[in-house]
Amino acid sequence: FNDAPPSYQHALQSSSINIKPTSDPSLTSALDNRLQRYPKTRTKPTVPSRWLPTSIFGLSKTAKQVRGTTQSLLRDLLSQARPSEHEWLSVLASCAEACSAQGLNFSALLQEPFIEGHLPVYWAILKRPVAPVKVDHTTPPGDPDSFVLTILDASLPLNAQSVADARLACMAVSDNALFVRLGQRFDGFSQRLGTDKVLLGGTDAIDSVSVDEQVDVSRAFTVRLSITQFQLRMRVSKLARVEFIARGRSKIPSSLSTHRTCCALLC
């Protein structure tokens, strides 16, 4: 196997990027269903024919080669300025299919730090478009968080490094809205106490935390909290833990414990 894996753009130019059902319906079928919303495009090849096999993994015959090609495609994808939803869905679905065919764990591969020492989700968060998003469990059309959420969904079950890298990326861009959303969608990001999980588990009850960073005052920010069943949690647990992200090393009252810009409020 002397040829380098196909580049991201070359892979997308292939007219045979169709996704087939695999033995992992919980992942590849979900990606495929979302991909079906987009019309199939057929463009005239503008690259050497050796880059246009029957699929973008046509040159990768062994598990080792598929693994290397998958990492190269994901690295190239995340190097793009703003990949469209159709582009990243195509790449993720093709990678998931190829890994499944070779018995590779695509979820585990997504949780390896093979892109400059970080996981794919780290770079997806850093490069996500900046736009306000309603904090909820859904992924509406045009959602700027869609790429990040899809990577994390495909990575389940999340390991400690995925949670740590995603948290680090949220702090780097001071994105509290995304950070709160991840905590509501994925258990690994939740900072709820064990008693709170029993009290509130299985319900739609969520804590709301919004951060308003003041543009006219250096390092100033305002935090607005809405804590679900606050009195009950105080009577049972004696505290309620709420976590948020704010910029810089702001001065925080003694009731707050800090770690860089990630803060835990004990009420």
Image (cartoon, grey):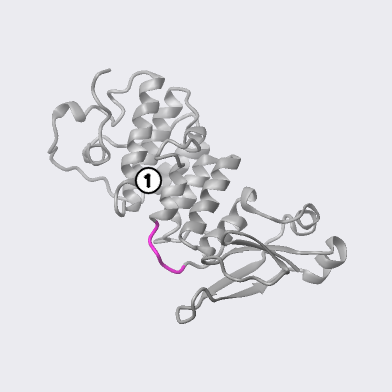
Image quarter of the C terminus? bottom right
- Specify whether residue 258 is painted magenta: no
In the rendered image, which quarter is residue 40 located in? top left
Residue at x-position 38% and y-position 33%: 71
Q: Is residue 25 above or below residue 141?
A: above
Image location of residue 124, percent across then percent down: 42, 50
Q: Mark 1 points at which residue?
A: 89
In front here: 57 or 191? Answer: 191
Q: Residue furthest bottom?
A: 216
Q: Quadrant of residue 237?
A: bottom right
Q: Residue 141, relative to residue 222: is it above or below?
A: above
Frontmost residue, 2 versus 149 = 2
For mark 1, does the 10 Å Cα neighbourhood hold few (<14), some (14 to 19), or many (20 or more) residues?
many
- Give the magenta part as a residue range: 128-132
Element assignment for label 1? helix
Q: What's the residue at 14%, 35% (across, down)?
A: 47
Residue 46: % across, % down: 12, 38
Q: Which residue lies furthest to the right in this view?
A: 235
The quadrant where residue 224 appears: bottom right
Query: Left or right of 62: which side holds 192?
Result: right
- Tell me the quarter of the image containing the N terminus: top left
Residue 113 at x, y = what percent?
A: 46, 37
- From the top left corner, tell me how far across and down residue 130 is, in percent: 40, 64
Residue 110 visible in rendering: yes
